[in-house]
Structures are given as C-alpha cells and as structure tokens.
Image (spheres, rainbow, N blue to C red):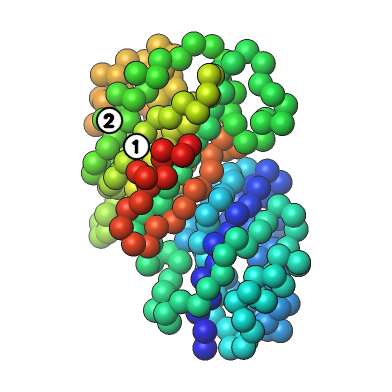
Amino acid sequence: MRTIKLTIAFDGTHYHGWQRQENDPTIQQDVERAVSMICNSRITVHGAGRTDAGVHALGMTAHFKTSKSMSCSKLQKGLNSLLPGAIRVVSLADESTDFHARYSALSKTYCYATFTGTIQPPKERFYTAHYPGRISADAMRSCLEVISGTHDFSSFEAAGSRDKNLTAGRGAVRTIFCAQLNQPSAGYFNLLFTGNGFLRHMVRNLTGTIIEVGKGQRSVNEFERILKYKDRQQAGTTAPPHGLTLLSVNYDKVTGIKSFQQL
C-alpha cells in the first residue's frame, strides 16, 4: 500500500472550505472524487487541516493511501485533468507509510493580503481585503512582535474551535515562530504568520485586531492586554476570509522566514 503526498493549490472563492460537508461544495470532496476515479476505489484524502469558506491555498498538503501502481507523474496529470480549474495538484510524491498530512506537520505559514488605497482593482476583490485609508505599518509590526513566541491565544479563537471542557492537550496555547508585515508595493500590506498550529479563525481575528491598531482605533498596549485577557470579546473584528491564503505546510525545519522575503 502506497502513501501519496499531495501539495494542492486552490481558489476558495466558491468553496465552503476544505472539509467535506453534507450539502455544500468543498475542496476535499472534489479532490476525493478525482482520486477515487483515478484509483478505481473509494479513497479518503486527509488534509493538513481545515480552511474556512472563501480562504485560498498555494500549498495545502494532503495524503491518501492506494495500491494503484501508477507513476506519480501520471497520477498528477490524471488528477489535474479531472479536477475543476479552481483546484490544482502542484506536486505529488510517494511518502513513507507513517506520513500523515496533519500529524506529521511541524508548522504552517499563512499570508493575509490587504489593500489600503481608495479604489481597489476589481480583479483583486476575491484575493485581497480592502481597508481604505491611512494605516501605520510600524504599529502593526509592533503587534506582530507581541504575538511572536508561545502564548495562549484564547482572545483570538472563534467559538467551536475546540472542546473547552477538555483538560488534556495544549488548549489555546500555540507558538508563532515568525510574524512579519511586508509591503510589496504602495498601498499593499501582507501579514505573514508561521506557527505550530492555529485555532479556528485565529489568523483572521489577529489580523482584524492588528488592522484596528494600524488605523489608530486601538493602541499597541491595548493589543498586548487583549492577548493577556484570554477573552474573544475583548479583541477586534474578524478579517474577511478572501484575504487569507495558506502558503505552505512545513514538515522539516521552519522555513517560513525565508519565504517571507518574496511576498
């Protein structure tokens, strides 16, 4: 039995996230349908995690097991011929039998893209959140310094993120290895996060609150207090999903810092 690792890029605009659902289109459903057709059997595809409705990916990782004796190049070509244009398998390879897309992952890297100009180019409306007006890059960078390291991110998790009655496990504690703000061109700001895990809506809740600080609606000191409160009601609004892209899932050492320089 082979273990096949997939790296998948997708446009999440018209999907209700990664995980299969009863009545709504999802990335997992479309990928499983294509894989099952190629392998001539019902296949379950395991993703590295969930993504929200409307969120995109350049490097979602998934895996499945099969006894199909087809080369990786033919598998990749066949899958892309069956998948809709919004989903592409950008790489495919055999992995060790103990590889798991979710449990083997050491970190993930996300990018949240924003535009602050008065008029947003229409072609960007599905991939970049529009926050018109002046914004302080220095204030936002100060917030990113605050969240770097290991913290309890209860203030930035959505309802239903986890079972709060459980006493075992890490709870809402996560480690942010790297958090940066890049400005690829005038009016554009990319917030980038590499961490060992993210709670439901955590990146979007962090981004929404950090943008409020950048716009002068909150102070950096207030942001620091919000993190310590461990209370979602103290934090800011949730940034819309379409500005968020999963860049990569990392299985070796953390490589997010190097990739940030290109964004």
Can residue 64 be seen here? yes
Q: Residue at x 58, y 28 (%)?
A: 129
> Would you say 210 lies left or right of 146 here?
right
Classify 177 as above or below 3.
above
Query: According to the image, label 1 marks what residue?
Result: 179
**Would you identify the image quadrant in which residue 33 lies?**
bottom right
Q: Where is residue 12? Give x, y as percent.
A: 64, 47
What percent of the width, then of the height, locates residue 115?
56, 23
The residue where tag 2 is placed is 145
Tags 2 and 1 in contact by the CB under 8 Å rule?
yes
The residues bearing labels 2 and 1 have C-alpha atoms spaced at a distance of: 7 Å
The residue sitting at 29% across, 45% down in the picture is 177
Number of numbered discs present?
2
Residue depicted at x 30% and y 24%: 142
Residue drawn where x is 29% and y is 35% of the image = 147
> Reading the chain from its start, which is encountered first: label 2 or label 1?
2
Three-letter residue code for mark 1:
Ala
Residue 89 versus residue 149 in the image, above or below: below
